[in-house]
Each structure stands twice: as structure tokens, then as C-alpha cells.
Image (cartoon, rainbow, N blue to C red):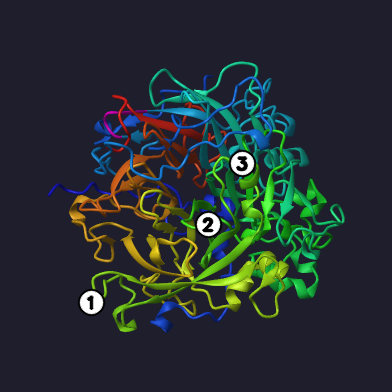
């Protein structure tokens, strides 16, 4: 057995898990330092039983010790003009069976944990930056100049802190595609020269930050016959688009649209909102649109202490302070737009926390916020077409002790009818998960020791919350349930989970995989104790949660579940890798996003590695004898988080978002902790990785 590489200490003061304190401040407003929003008495399981590229910053594994796009099968449209949404073709994005001749074994040599300020990939692979913060998106946009940055400039440039990555093919030849990326949050300390405090920011700087939020749509072209991609060249790029928190209008759909909860002085009909906030992960739909989840929106609002008294418990359940006008970490956006002051506009916060749908093939179309999918701190949403023809979206609420959800559409998917399919998320049934373990409570002792049957597993029920305009929660209307979905989950006794983030159906097996990132409060003090789905006290490293819907029917209301991976150092007895020899697997901490290649291998990106190494991208088989053989494929630079990933349908390219490089306490634009990717100061960026011999990534 080879000696496992020694883990190195963190370079900056750590926040919770492996996150630096600076990340905790800017990403979620120090959420872990505030009381847990879920104060419900729900039982836990224990009670139940510039071409945009650079060669700098790339290191292959030999020097230190994958994403699939179904392009070939995609139907396309001419590049000369952007098509209307109703006539746009349906791209074939989600492989439903393994690719011909594609073996499931992952053959790359895993890279070791490290603390390098580089992007590290295995031998035999290459990687390049596709787009970085400030790169031009709209034709005529200027290059980034941090000393001359304005909201107008930023609104035409690639935004900050890219998280979700989706790729939609254009044309039948596999040469062109649309990259859709969301921009979760800004770190002004690393953006503005001479930055001192959030309170001291000018209104113009606040507007730049607002313009750096949102989403970017950028046309790409393949480089030669390789797996490399770059921004398309030319003056006519009709699909390129910036969506911002500053000015982009969104339409509400579904039962809560027009309800009293969504009405404001600026929008008395409750029909539309301006902007989208803190967009985290997302998903690509079978009809070629992109979903994006609004997550930690609470930190953008002030004045909760002066909100109406009957509204305060609802605001508090979503992490909005009702005791201080300016809670710690407040971004002070109310100085630029008054709507962020809840003392004056108490309903404005209800207009965020939704799943957003953007049609990249309709650049003039208004993006939508789908109320039928509920309001929570959405990590994202991923859709699969069930055997009945209904589409099913799986979602996680990224907070300690919050819940897993699924949505089943009222209407059925119709292949080739894009106009119809664009309406599928506007009406349906919303469920929340309640779990039971199958082992005696005494066998779940908080140490992570497996129960006598050798696996953490059990059964579950999808509890119906609302269907169409009918509520199934006593005392709550359909609009109440959808606007305050967390309270509805509390009311029906949903199971409290360890930060459920990305939830993804396997296109090969149909099983569902959720990343439960961590929960340092599990079993600590008066917080809920351990259970079979969340089996460790003070859970620093997280776990992967697997759902098998009964009879393979994604519309079923019952399921079985298990934990195939309990993360951490394999040398730690509290870890588990589906029974695989732990001396052969890579250490992993804090899983965040998940994706699949066409062979059905599970790819996992991490956020906040609590083992002392940079975050990374990992892959493992989830079926057969290699199940649990987890290997590290990539590490990101210092202070960064690994986001995405997206694997193209031909298995030749892996897109990864490198978020917040250099986000380490004490860093600034002038004194960066990371100089990736260009050698001057840190810039979030999307990268693509491919095999040098042109073969499928991973194997």
C-alpha cells in the first residue's frame, strides 16, 4: 500500500469546516454564526427508527506528485439569427443509456491533495480558461479595468464568482454551444482597489457588485477536433447575454404569482421582479433551458427589525434578521435601491428564493421564477423525465437541518414540442422528504460506525405539500405553502438533513444522488442529534445520499435510500466508500455539486475542504465492482471552491467553475492570496479540461 500524501495546514483562518472566514462573510453572511433557522420540533431519524485562454496556472499530476455535452445528436439553428423560443430545436443533452463501447472504469491516476496556487489535472490531460471575471460578453464590451469599472461595463462583461455551469449545443456538427453560467456573489475586497469596508462602499461600487451578480450566456466554439472550447469569435453573437441583479426583469409563474405575498409598491400585481440573487447551482432541462437556484438571498436585505410583527417569524425562518437593522455582513444594497429595505418594502424578500429558468436560445425572452417549485434557499434543480412522461425536479435546501424536495409536473413532456415543454414547471405537485432508518437507534452512536447490517440505509416518503392551487398543509393556502415552503416542511414533519445541496438524477440508472455538504451543529448542544441518514456528531465532511424511487417511478411517493459515501479521510474509521478498499480511495471533504458522465460515473465537486487541502473534483463508479472507488481528478487554486461540473454528452470535455480563488482572510486586490489565472490578481473563471489523446475523460 502506498503512503497517503500528507495533508497541509490551511493558510488562512478557517470559518466553518474548511471555509475561510472571508468566504463565510461574503457567500452567506456568516450564516453558521447565526442561530439555526429551523427551530421546528420535527423528529429526526433517531426518534423514528484574449481568446479567453491561458497556459499559466495549469499543473499536471506528474509535476506535483470531465464534462459531457450531447452535441452530435443535437438539432441546431443557423447562427445568423436568434430563433424565437417557440421554434427553437430541442437539444439532446441527457444521455439515457451508456455510450456505445463506453466502459465504466475510471482509469486516470488520481492526483494527490495539495495547496498549490494552480489548477492541477492528471497526466494525459490539459486544461484552459474559457472565461474569467471581466471578460467581454456582449459585443463591444470593454476589457476588465478594475480602476475604471462601472455598472455599465460590468453589465456587458462576465460576472463574478461563477458557480453553476450548463452547456447547450448549437448545430448538428458539434462545433458550437452555449455556455450558461450563474454568478453567485461578489467579494468586494478582491474587486475594488483601496477597499476598506462594505459600509464605506460608494453607491457606484454597489451597482457594479449588483451587475456582477446574475447569469451569463456566451456562445462557444470547439478548438479544432479536441475537447477544448473557447468563446466564439466574430461580431455577430446573437445569443450572448448578461442577466443581472441590477436591472433584468423576471416574470413570476405558478400558483403564487400575483399573490399578496409578492406584491410591492413597484409591482402591485405581484407579476414580475427585478434581478436574481445569490444564484448557486442549477440544471439543464431536457428541452434545452437552464435552471438556477436562488440561495442565500437573506443577506441582501436590511430593516427586518422594522417589518410587520406577524411577518417577522417568516423572515427569521429564512435567515433574515428581525432584531437588527444592519445585521453583520449586510451588503447595504438599500443605498443603491430602496427595495432592499424591508422596513419600507417588507414583501421584497419574498420575491427571491425561487428556481429561475432561462432560455439561452431566446436571448430576448424574459427569464422566469417558478413559484410551483417552492421558495427556499435553493442550491439548484435537476430534471428527469419519468416513465409516466411527467418531468420531476429534485431540489435541496442548503441550510443546516433543512429539507429535500421534489416537484412533479402536472403536464407531460412531449418530445419535439418545445413550446409546450417550456410550460412544464409552471404547475404540478411539490413534495418534501421524510425518512426512516432501518437500524436500531442504539447502533447509530454518532461516531460514524456502521450499523450491524453494514450500511446506513432506510426508507422514505414524499409528503405532498401542494398540488396546483390546492394546499395539503392545514392552515396554509397554496400561495402560503409556496412562498414559505420551509414552514410547510416544518408543519408536516420533514426530516432535517445536513445541508442538502445539489441533487441529481443519474441518466443511466435513474437513481437520485444528493450532496449533503456538512453540519457542524449536528448533535451539538440543543441541536438535533444523529440519525441513520446523518450519522456523525459535528459532521465536518458530509456524505452522499442515494435515493431509489419505488418501482423506478420518479413520480412515486415512497423510496429507499442509502449513504454510499460518508466523506472524510479514508484512514478515519468514520468514513465509508460503498465497501470499497479504503486504502485505494482519495480523501474527500464537503461534497457540493454532482454530475454524471455517459457511463454513469458520479462526479463530485467540493466546497470547504476540511482536510487541509485545496478543493477538488472527484469521480467514482456507482454500480458494479468499482462502486466507491473514488479518485481525485482535479484541484483548484488557493482559496477557491470547485463548482459545476458539466460533462459534455460526448464525454470529451469537463467544464468546471473555479469560484472565489484567493478568498483568504487578509487578501485584497493589491495584496492577493492567489494570482490565478493570469499572474496579477485572483479572478473567478470557468475552465475546460480534456484528454490529450482525444478520448473520453475519466476512462
Is-magenta flag for residue 230?
no
For marks 3 and 1, give the one nearer the viewer.
3
Q: Is residue 71 above or below residue 536?
A: above
Mark positioned earlier in the residue sequence (3 or 1): 3
Is-magenta flag for residue 123?
yes
473 sits left or right of 19 in the view: right
Q: Position of residue 387 (x, y in %)?
A: 46, 56
Q: Position of residue 452 (x, y in %)?
A: 23, 76
- How busy is the neighbourhood of tag 2: few (under 14 within 10 Å), some, or many (20 plus)? many
Under circle 1, the secondary element is loop
343 sits left or right of 196 in the view: right
- How busy is the neighbourhood of tag 3: few (under 14 within 10 Å), some, or many (20 plus)? some
506 sits left or right of 660 in the view: left
Please report contact status of discs 3 and 1: CB closer than 8 Å, yes or no: no
Residue at mark 3 to residue at mark 1: CA–CA distance: 50 Å
Mark positioned earlier in the residue sequence (2 or 1): 2
| Residue under the image location 51 percent in, 51 percent down | 382
Q: Identify the residue under disc 1.
A: 452
In the foreground, 122 or 429: 429
- How busy is the neighbourhood of tag 1: few (under 14 within 10 Å), some, or many (20 plus)? few
Residue at mark 2 to residue at mark 3: CA–CA distance: 17 Å
For marks 2 and 3, give the one nearer the viewer.
3
The quadrant in which the C terminus is found is top left
Please report contact status of discs 2 and 1: CB closer than 8 Å, yes or no: no
Label of residue 418 in the image: 3
Q: Identify the residue under disc 2.
A: 392
Under circle 2, the secondary element is strand
Q: Position of residue 91 (x, y in %)?
A: 52, 36
Amino acid at each position: 500500500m502506498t503512503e497517503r500524501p500528507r495533508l497541509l495546514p490551511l493558510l488562512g483562518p478557517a470559518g466553518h469546516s474548511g471555509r475561510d472566514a472571508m468566504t463565510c462573510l461574503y457567500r452567506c453572511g456568516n450564516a453558521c454564526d447565526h442561530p439555526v433557522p429551523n427551530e421546528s420540533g420535527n423528529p429526526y431519524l433517531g426518534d423514528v427508527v484574449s481568446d479567453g485562454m491561458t497556459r499559466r496556472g495549469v499543473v499536471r499530476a506528474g509535476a506535483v506528485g470531465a464534462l459531457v455535452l450531447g452535441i452530435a445528436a443535437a438539432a441546431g439553428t443557423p447562427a445568423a439569427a436568434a430563433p424565437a423560443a417557440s421554434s427553437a430545436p430541442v437539444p439532446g443533452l441527457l444521455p439515457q443509456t451508456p455510450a456505445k463501447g463506453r466502459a465504466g472504469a475510471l482509469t486516470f491516476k488520481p492526483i494527490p491533495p495539495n495547496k498549490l496556487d494552480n489548477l492541477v489535472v492528471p497526466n494525459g490531460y490539459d486544461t484552459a480558461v474559457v472565461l474569467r471575471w471581466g471578460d467581454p460578453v456582449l459585443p463591444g464590451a470593454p476589457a476588465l479595468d478594475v480602476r475604471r469599472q462601472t455598472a455599465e461595463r460590468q453589465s456587458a462583461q462576465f460576472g463574478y464568482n461563477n458557480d453553476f455551469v450548463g452547456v447547450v449545443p448549437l448545430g448538428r456538427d458539434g462545433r458550437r454551444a452555449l455556455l450558461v453560467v450563474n454568478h453567485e456573489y461578489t467579494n468586494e475586497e478582491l474587486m475594488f482597489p483601496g477597499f476598506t469596508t462594505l459600509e464605506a462602499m460608494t453607491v457606484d461600487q454597489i451597482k457594479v457588485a449588483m451587475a456582477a451578480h446574475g447569469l451569463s450566456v456566451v456562445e462557444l466554439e470547439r478548438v479544432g477536433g479536441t475537447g477544448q472550447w473557447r468563446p466564439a469569435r466574430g461580431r455577430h453573437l446573437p445569443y450572448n447575454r448578461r442577466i443581472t441583479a441590477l436591472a433584468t426583469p423576471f416574470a413570476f409563474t405558478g400558483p403564487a404569482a400575483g399573490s399578496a405575498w409578492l406584491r410591492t409598491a413597484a409591482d402591485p400585481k405581484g407579476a414580475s421582479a427585478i434581478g436574481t440573487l445569490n444564484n448557486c447551482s442549477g440544471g439543464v432541462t431536457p428541452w434545452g433551458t437552464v435552471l438556477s437556484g436562488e440561495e442565500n438571498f437573506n443577506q441582501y436585505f436590511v430593516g427586518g427589525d422594522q417589518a410587520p410583527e406577524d411577518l417577522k417569524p417568516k423572515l427569521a425562518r429564512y435567515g433574515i434578521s428581525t432584531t437588527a437593522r444592519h445585521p453583520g455582513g449586510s451588503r447595504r444594497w438599500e443605498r443603491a435601491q430602496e427595495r432592499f429595505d424591508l422596513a419600507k418594502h417588507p414583501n421584497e424578500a419574498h420575491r427571491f428564493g425561487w428556481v429561475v429558468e432561462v432560455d439561452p436560445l431566446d436571448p430576448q425572452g424574459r427569464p422566469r421564477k417558478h413559484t410551483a417549485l417552492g421558495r427556499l434557499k435553493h442550491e439548484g434543480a435537476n430534471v428527469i423525465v419519468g416513465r409516466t412522461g411527467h418531468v420531476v425536479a429534485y431540489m435541496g435546501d442548503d441550510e443546516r437541518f433543512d429539507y429535500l424536495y421534489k416537484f412533479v409536473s402536472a403536464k407531460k413532456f412531449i418530445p419535439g414540442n418545445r413550446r409546450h415543454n417550456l410550460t412544464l414547471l409552471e404547475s404540478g405537485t411539490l413534495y418534501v422528504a421524510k425518512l426512516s432508518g432501518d437500524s436500531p437507534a442504539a447502533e447509530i452512536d454518532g461516531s460514524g460506525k456502521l450499523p450491524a447490517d453494514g450500511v446506513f440505509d432506510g426508507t422514505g416518503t414524499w409528503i405532498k405539500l401542494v398540488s396546483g392551487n390546492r394546499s395539503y398543509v392545514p392552515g396554509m393556502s397554496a400561495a402560503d405553502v409556496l412562498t414559505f415552503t420551509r414552514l410547510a416542511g416544518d408543519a408536516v414533519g420533514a426530516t432535517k438533513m445536513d445541508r442538502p445541496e445539489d441533487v441529481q438524477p443519474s441518466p443511466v440508472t435513474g437513481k437520485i444522488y444528493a450532496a449533503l455538504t456538512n453540519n457542524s451543529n449536528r448533535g451539538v448542544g440543543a441541536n438535533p442529534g444523529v440519525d441513520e441518514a446523518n450519522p456523525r456528531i459535528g459532521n465536518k465532511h458530509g456524505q452522499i445520499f442515494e435515493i431509489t424511487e419505488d418501482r423506478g417511478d420518479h413520480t412515486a411517493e415512497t423510496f429507499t435510500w442509502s449513504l454510499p459515501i460518508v466523506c472524510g479521510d479514508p484512514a478515519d474509521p468514520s468514513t465509508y466508500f460503498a465497501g470499497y478498499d479504503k486504502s485505494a480511495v482519495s480523501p474527500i471533504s464537503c461534497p457540493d455539486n454532482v454530475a454524471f458522465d455517459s457511463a454513469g460515473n458520479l462526479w463530485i465537486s467540493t466546497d470547504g475542504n476540511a482536510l487541509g487541502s485545496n478543493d477538488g473534483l472527484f469521480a467514482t463508479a456507482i454500480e458494479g465492482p468499482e462502486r466507491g472507488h473514488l479518485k481525485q481528478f482535479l484541484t483548484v487554486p488557493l482559496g477557491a471552491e470547485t463548482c459545476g461540473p458539466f460533462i459534455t454528452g460526448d464525454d470529451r470535455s469537463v467544464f468546471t467553475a473555479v469560484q472565489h480563488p484567493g478568498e483568504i482572510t487578509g487578501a485584497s486586490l493589491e495584496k492577493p492570496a492567489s494570482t490565478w489565472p493570469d499572474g496579477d490578481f485572483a479572478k473567478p473563471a470557468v475552465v475546460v479540461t480534456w484528454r490529450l489523446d482525444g478520448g473520453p475523460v475519466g476512462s
